[in-house]
Amino acid sequence: MKDKVLCVRVNKQTYDDAKEILEPLGISISVGVNMFLKKVCLKKSLPFELTYDDYNNQTKDVIKKCYQVAEDEIEYNSVDEMIEDSKNWK
C-alpha cells in the first residue's frame, strides 16, 4: 500500500514544543502524527477527552443542555424549533 502525504498547518510554537518533547524519545513529528492517527483508528475516537473548561459559563450551559437533549432523545421538527427552544435553556 502506498503512503499518503499529509500536509497540515500547525502553529510554530506548538510544532517547536512538540518537537522538543518527541526528539529525545527518538520520535519525529511525522512518526508522532502517525502514532496519533493509529490510536484514533484503534479507539475509533479521539485518544483523549475533550473538555470545555476554557469556555464561558453560557457556552458550558449550552453544551450541557445539548448532551441532555441527546440523552433524552428530544426531537425537533426543524432547526428553527430547536433554536427557539434553546432560548429557554437554563
Image (spheres, rainbow, N blue to C red):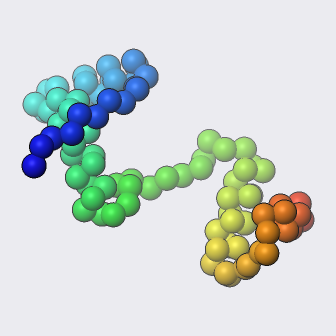
Question: Quadrant of the image for the C terminus?
Answer: bottom right
Against 71, residue 24 (above or below) is: above
Is residue 84 among what the camera can see?
Answer: yes
User: 85 or 7, which is in the foreground?
Assistant: 7
The spot of residue 82 in percent (x, y) is: 80, 66
Q: Nearer the viewer, residue 69 or 77?
A: 77
On the image, which quarter does residue 15 sit in?
Answer: top left
Q: How many numbered marks are there?
A: 0
Picture coordinates of residue 45 (x, y %)?
Answer: 38, 60
**In the image, residue 47 above or below residue 65:** above
| Residue 86 visible in the snapshot | no
Residue found at x 23% / y 30%: 29
Give coordinates of residue 43: x percent, y percent. 30, 63
| Residue shown at the point (74%, 58%) measured from the top left | 61
Looking at the image, residue 90 lies above or below residue 59: below
Who's the residue at 68% across and 59% down the image?
Answer: 63
Residue 34 left/right relative to 66? left
**Residue 58 left/right relative to 36:** right
Is 3 rendered above or below residue 80? above
Give residue 49's position: percent from left, percent from top.
44, 55
- Residue depicted at x 68% and y 81%: 72
